C-alpha cells in the first residue's frame, strides 16, 4: 500500500513540468526543482517540529556517511540530472520521461551484487513492466503533441544517469529505512538536496524570478514530493528494493489521468496493453522476503 501511494503521489510530476515547459508561463527546470525540494524539505521539518519529533533528526549523527550518500544520489544527483535532461528536450520531453522508467530495471540488475539480489522472475517482471512503459509512451496522439525532434545521445545518457541515481538511492535507502523512521530521513534528504541545488543554481546563474503561478505550483508539488518520499521509504522498510521497484511503474499508469486532464489525450490500444503489462509486472515481480505489512495508521504515525 505504501508503494502504491508513493507512485500515485509521484504521477503528476512529469505532466506538471511538461506543461510548464510548453506553456507561456515558463521557468528554468533546475530553479523549479530547487523550489520543489525547498518546500518539500521545509514541510517535512515543520511536521517534525509541530509533532515535537525534531530529536529524530539525530539520525544524521548516527548515520552521517550513509545519509550524505542518499542526499548525493536522491536529493541532488537525481534532480540535477533530470532537470538538465528535461531542459535539453523541451520539444520532446516524453523521451526523458520514458528513460526515467528504466530505473526499476536498472535497480533489478544492480541488486544482483547485494544480499537481496533480485530473482530471475523479478528481473523478468521488471523487463515486462518497462515494455509496458514503452507501449504507453508509444501513443501516437501523445507524440503528435511534441513539436521538437527526439533528444540526442547526450540527453538520453543524462536521462539514464538520472534513472540510475534513483535506482542507487532506492538500493542504498533500504538498510536505513529498515531501522529508522521515514519522516526524518525524507526531511534530511530533501532539505540538504535543496541546499545543493541552490548552490548549483547560483554557480550556473539560473535563479531568475518566478511567477506566482510557478511558485504555487512548486509548493504543491514540493509537499506531494515530501509525502511521496516518506511513503516510498516506508515501503522499503518492509520489502526488498527489487520487490518494491515494479510498483514505481504504476506512477506512469496513474499519470494517464494527468495526461488526459492536462493535455486532453485519450488512451489508445497500445496504452491499454501497456497498462496490462505493468499490472502483471507489479504482481509477478513482488516475490521476495517481505516483512509483515504495517497498517496505514502506523505508516502515517511514523
Image: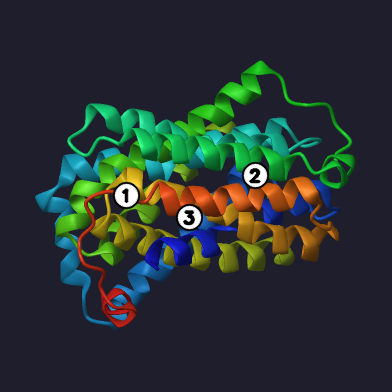
- Looking at this view, is 98 or 82 the one in front? 98
Using a 10 Å C-alpha cutoff, classify the residue at mark 2 as few (fewer than 14 neighbours), some (14 to 19) or many (20 or more): many
Q: Where is residue 285 in the image (x, y as percent from the top left)?
A: 40, 46
Q: Which of the two discs, 1 and 2, sits closer to the camera?
A: 1
Residue hosting label 1: 287
Q: Which residue is drawn at 59% across and 47% down?
A: 277
Q: Can residue 120 be seen in this view?
A: yes
**Do the numbered discs 2 and 3 sit on residues whose CB atoms are within 8 Å?**
no
Which residue in the structure is indicated by mark 2? 29
Q: What element carries label 3?
A: helix
Image spot of residue 113 (x, y percent): 24, 26
Q: Is residue 126 left or right of residue 253?
A: left
Label 1: element kind: loop
List the single residue furthest toward the top. Answer: 153
The residue to which callout 3 is attached is 37
Closest to the observer: 81 or 289? 289
Residue at the image position 89 percent from the left and 41 percent from the top: 144
Position of residue 76 measured from the top left corner of the image (x, y, whole percent)? 42, 41
Amino acid at each position: 500500500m505504501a508503494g502504491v501511494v508513493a507512485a500515485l503521489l509521484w504521477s503528476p510530476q512529469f505532466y506538471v513540468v511538461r506543461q510548464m515547459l510548453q506553456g507561456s508561463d515558463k521557468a528554468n527546470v533546475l530553479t523549479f526543482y530547487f523550489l520543489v525540494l525547498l518546500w518539500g524539505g521545509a514541510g517535512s521539518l515543520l511536521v517534525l517540529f509541530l509533532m515535537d519529533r525534531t530529536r529524530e533528526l539525530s539520525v544524521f549523527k548516527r548515520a552521517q556517511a550513509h545519509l550524505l550518500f542518499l542526499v548525493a544520489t536522491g536529493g541532488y544527483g537525481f534532480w540535477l540530472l533530470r532537470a538538465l535532461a528535461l531542459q535539453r528536450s523541451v520539444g520532446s520531453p516524453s523521451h526523458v520521461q520514458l528513460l526515467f522508467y528504466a530505473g526499476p530495471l536498472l535497480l533489478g540488475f544492480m541488486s544482483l551484487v547485494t544480499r537481496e539480489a533480485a530473482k530471475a522472475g523479478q528481473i523478468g517482471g521488471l523487463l515486462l513492466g518497462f515494455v509496458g512503459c514503452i507501449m504507453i509512451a508509444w501513443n501516437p496522439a501523445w507524440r503528435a503533441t511534441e513539436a521538437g525532434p527526439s533528444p540526442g545521445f547526450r540527453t538520453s545518457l543524462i536521462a539514464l544517469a538520472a534513472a540510475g541515481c534513483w535506482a542507487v538511492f532506492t538500493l542504498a535507502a533500504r538498510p536505513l529505512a529498515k531501522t529508522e523512521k521515514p519522516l526524518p530521513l525524507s526531511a534530511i534528504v530533501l532539505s540538504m538536496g535543496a541546499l545543493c541545488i541552490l548552490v548549483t543554481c547560483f554557480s550556473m546563474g539560473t535563479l531568475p524570478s518566478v511567477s506566482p503561478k510557478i511558485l504555487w505550483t512548486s509548493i504543491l508539488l514540493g509537499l506531494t514530493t515530501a509525502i511521496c518520499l516518506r511513503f516510498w521509504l516506508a515501503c522499503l522498510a518492509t520489502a526488498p528494493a527489487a520487490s518494491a521497484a515494479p510498483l514505481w511503474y504504476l506512477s506512469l499508469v496513474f499519470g494517464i489521468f494527468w495526461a488526459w486532464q492536462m493535455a486532453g489525450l485519450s488512451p489508445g490500444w497500445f496504452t491499454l496493453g501497456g497498462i496490462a503489462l505493468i499490472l502483471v509486472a507489479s504482481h509477478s515481480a513482488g516475490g521476495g522476503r517481505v516483512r509483515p505489512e504495517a497498517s496505514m495508521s502506523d505508516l502515517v504515525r511514523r
